[in-house]
Image (spheres, helix red, strand yellow):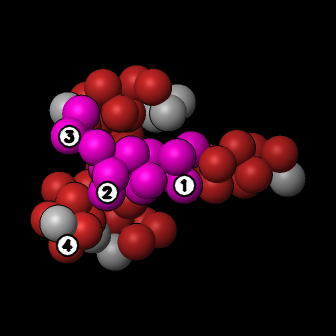
Amino acid sequence: MSEIFELHAWLEAARMAVETSNAPLGRIAGETGFGDPGRMRRAFMRSFGQPPRALRRAAR
């Protein structure tokens, strides 16, 4: 159960950063617990149905 909560917290932190900052996606991935952009991208695809770049574009 705690792993699910942790992933949810990572996803929400990363989504907020992707949508509201100009930080590189690699830095966001590292700072939010994903470690690398590929892992963050796969999690975004599973959870949001689109990659981080698409969410960033949509938020602008």
| Distance (Cα) linking label 1 and label 3 | 17 Å
- For disc 2, the marked residue is 19
**Amino acid type for the residue under numbered disc 2:** Glu
- For disc 1, the marked residue is 12
Mark 4 or mark 2, which has the lower sequence index? Answer: 2
Residue at horizontal 52 percent and vertical 30 percent from the top: 33
Residue 20 falls left or right of residue 12? left
Is the stretch drawn in magenta largely helix, strand or loop? helix
- What numbered label is drawn on residue 20? none
* Rendering coords of residue 25 (x, y %): 24, 37
- For disc 4, the marked residue is 58
* Rendering coords of residue 48 (x, y %): 40, 71
Residue at horizontal 52 percent and vertical 46 percent from the top: 13
Name the front one of labels 1 and 3.
3
| Distance (Cα) linking label 1 and label 4 | 16 Å
Q: Are marks 4 and 2 in contact (CB under 8 Å)?
A: no
| Distance (Cα) linking label 4 and label 2 | 8 Å
- For disc 3, the marked residue is 22
